[in-house]
Amino acid sequence: MIDSILQTIQTEIQQIIKQTVDINFEIPKEENFGDYSTNIAMKLAKEWKKSPIIIANEIVSKINLAACHLKKCEIAGPGFINFFIDRTHLSKVIYKIIAEKNNYGNLKIGNENINLEFVSANPTGYLHIGHGRGAAYGDSLARILKKAGFTVTKEHYVNDAGNQIHNLAHSIYERYKEIQGLDCQLHEDDYHGKEIIVVAKQIFNEVGDAYLSQPWFEYFRDYGTNYLLDGLKKDLKKFHVEFDVWFSERSLYENKAVEKTLQFLIDEGFTYEKDGAVWLKTTLFKDEKDRVLVKSDKSYTYLTPDIAYHANKLNRGFDRLIDVLGADHHGYIERLKAAIACLGKSPEQIDIEILQMVRVIQDGVELKMSKRSGKAITLRDLMDEIGTDALRYMYAAKALSTPMDLDLDLALKQTNENPVYYIQYAYARIASLFRTYEEMGLKWQLPSDFIEIDLDKLDKLILLLAQYPLIIKEAALKRIPHKIAQYCYQLAAALHYYYNDEKIITENSRDTVEKLSVLKAVQIVLKNSLDLIGVNVKEKM
């Protein structure tokens, strides 16, 4: 609805100025400056050789307010034109929301088939707080992109090959020996977490001392990988994250994809040998230096199977690949794009989102260790401490590119200071009103029009409801789930303000039904928008 109104205003202005130009609209920071604003008068000033104020006056004097569904438009500052949308027209969005329910806000802004890879943690231990941020972002982005009309496959790359898995198997085997009274010889690069001991005990309970006298590596590798991967899946499911594809790195070796990819790069002339190693000519495609694919000891670098993996994804027919990687991967972007170009694919098909660091704060102090285990804080610890909903919201509310502080004290508060509580309480308040209405023996029905309620008092609520599809569009195209989290908070704030200022259930039955209708629309959109960031609503609080 807002989209069509802004399009109508743009067409109207183009007809007035007799030019087909792009007209940008922004939401003013101050509410008294209207719902939307444009700087078109200032953009035309140099070309027209006129003051922006004079141009703005010419435009405003000729705008057909009724045709543009405007209550008024005003000139502000050096020549901004501010638009105030007619709330009577905008109130029609209530009927649209109630009719469409959870489908309200569904868009068709793109038909790309997107592969979204995120988390991709090594199955060698529990997920940590950085993985949690990546999981919240990736899952929220997938939900938003689907809402906007894209086809999305959520993929987790299982690092079940390479040196870290060799170290995992060795770590479990040493703990397995220790359980039986033998020396435990863990190396510095091995895994020392308590979960390794748990796996070793599981194996001992199942097979006893059988592997003290027979080849053990493959069994311990597969058992440990599968056990820890299963735990990772359970933690992610509890975090409201489920993947469509779990792609095994080992499969790239088993089907010779890594060898074939390397041979292709050699055959196409994109490699050379130096110091006994095989190098990829990534500097041909904007990388700062060439990269090693095969080390002098004939082992592969991390990049080599990664190139094969991304080739596999592109060969599966995806139009776009999105990888969500940790802050330490920032320098990886150009080399991966260059490698894609070496494969004969477009580097523009891959986008990499980098997540910044997370600090956990309690009592104003950064926590680096779990109080229970004395080890690094895990995602499991945080879910147990503050709950999944609070954690999902707080992760989603901050732009991925910004370092964040996760305030445990705030997340645990059952007050309006806690943004999650504040938003869920807004939904619960509406649910409570409908329960009260039904307990009075009354049945709510949507009225044919609004004749009793004061639309000026619903000003902010109605505008926010109408803006929801535009918020989704922006969040999807810019890949910023925090825009949805912020929207949830704004909608909840507008609801609380109205609720505190107005008596909803009154002796005037028509007035009550109309107010409840508006709140029903708010309830639908609150639930819908919270779902986009993986947060549940609460019927009672």
Image (tube, rainbow, N blue to C red):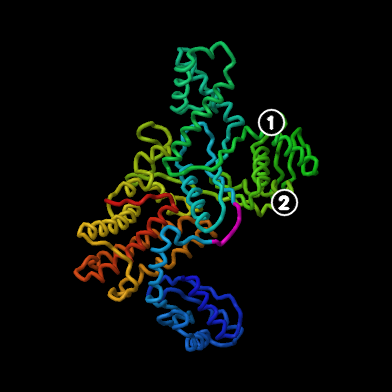
| Disc nearer the start of the sequence (2/1) | 2
Question: Most prominent secondary structure in the magenta stretch?
Answer: loop
Using the image as rendered, state which of residue 150 and residue 492 is in the foreground.
150
The CA distance from mark 2 to mark 1 is 25 Å
Taking the image as shown, residue 56 lies to the left or right of residue 461, namely right
Check disc 2 and report its element: helix, strand or loop.
Answer: helix
Residue 439 sits in quarter: bottom left
Check disc 2 and report the residue beneath it.
Answer: 285
Indicate whether 412 appears above or below 164. Answer: below
- Residue 84 spot, x, y in % from top left: 41, 77
Q: Where is residue 431 in the image (x, y as percent from the top left)?
A: 29, 56
112 inside magenta stretch: yes
Relative depth, front residue between 289 and 407 = 407
Residue 337 in sight from this viewpoint: yes
Residue at disc 1, secondary structure: loop
Q: Is residue 43 above or below residue 479?
A: below
Q: Name the residue under label 1.
A: 299
The image quadrant that residue 529 belongs to is bottom left
Give the residue displayed 72% in from the left and 31% down from the top.
296
* Disc 1 residue crowd, few under 14, some 14–19, many 20+, Cα 10 Å: few
Q: Which residue is drawn at 40% across and 36% down?
A: 369
Q: What stretch is highlighted in magenta?
A: 108-113
